[in-house]
Image (cartoon, rainbow, N blue to C red):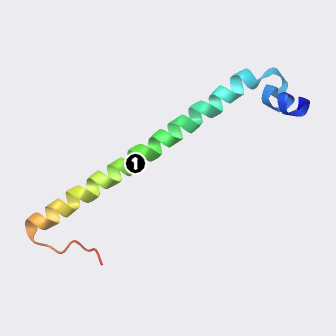
């Protein structure tokens, strides 16, 4: 248990390192969610435009 505490302490710098990891993870997850939402929005727009023009949707 002591080695686990030492790992999280990281030589006294854990107070600075762990928030950096957490912030990085939050930003990456946020970017992933935003990218997926943007992709789905654009796919829906494309399908609407293709339906409007009478073109096939391209789905098999």
* Residue 19 on image: x %, y %: 64, 26
Q: Quadrant of the C terminus?
A: bottom left
Q: Residue at x 46, y 46 (%)?
A: 32
Residue under numbered circle 1: 35
Q: Quadrant of residue 46?
A: bottom left
Q: Position of residue 7 (x, y in %)?
A: 83, 32
Q: Residue furthest toward the front?
A: 1
Residue in view at x 58 percent, y 35 percent: 24
Residue drawn at the location 24% of the way across and 57% of the way down: 44
The quarter in which the N terminus is drawn is top right
Q: Is residue 56 left or right of residue 5?
A: left
| Above/below status of 47 relative to 8 | below
Left or right: where 42 falls relative to 55: right
User: Does residue 20 lie above or below 37 as drawn?
Assistant: above
Name of the residue lying farthest toward the left: 53
Left or right: where 23 falls relative to 4: left
SS of the residue under disc 1: helix
Question: Picture coordinates of residue 35 (x, y %)?
Answer: 40, 48
Q: Farthest residue toward the right?
A: 2
């Amino acid at each position: 248990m002591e080695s686990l505490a030492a790992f999280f302490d990281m030589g006294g710098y854990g107070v600075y390192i762990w928030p950096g990891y957490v912030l990085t993870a939050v930003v990456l997850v946020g970017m992933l969610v935003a990218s997926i939402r943007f992709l789905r929005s654009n796919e829906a727009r494309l399908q609407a435009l293709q339906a409007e023009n009478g073109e096939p949707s391209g789905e098999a």
